[in-house]
Amino acid sequence: MGAVVSTLTPQKSLQLKLIIAFSMLQCGRTMQLDIIEYALGERKNITDLSADESRRVLNELMGGEVEIDEPTEAV
């Protein structure tokens, strides 16, 4: 059976980093939405965030600049 290959776009890569960061900080759903609202000025789901919005929220969480990864292939 062949391997399934998927490509992470910069948007999906940043959304994944954001999900991991929220998990590590043990943020509940309400706190996640509060943090997103604080960073962006509106409440949005993680999956609805653009790459730029995800980066802005991550910058707020991490206190620094977050780089966008080049698309990578996952096997």
Image (cartoon, grey):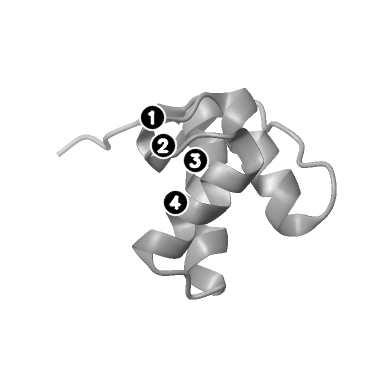
Amino acid tagged 1: Asp
- Residue 60 coordinates in the image, percent (x, y): 72, 49
Q: Depth check: 57 or 71 in front?
A: 57
- Residue 51 coordinates in the image, percent (x, y): 58, 26
Residue at x-position 41% and y-position 36%: 44
State the separation of the CA atoms marked 1 and 3. 9 Å
On the question of residue 30 being in view, the answer is yes
Sequence order check: which comes first, mark 4 or mark 3?
A: 3
Amino acid tagged 2: Lys
Sequence order check: which comes first, mark 3 or mark 2?
A: 3
On the question of residue 75 being in view, the answer is no
| Helix, strand or loop for disc 3 | helix
Amino acid tagged 4: Leu
State the separation of the CA atoms marked 1 and 4. 12 Å
**Which residue lies under the disc numbered 3?**
15
| Helix, strand or loop for disc 1 | helix
State the separation of the CA atoms marked 2 and 1. 6 Å
| Helix, strand or loop for disc 2 | loop
**Which residue lies under the disc numbered 2?**
44
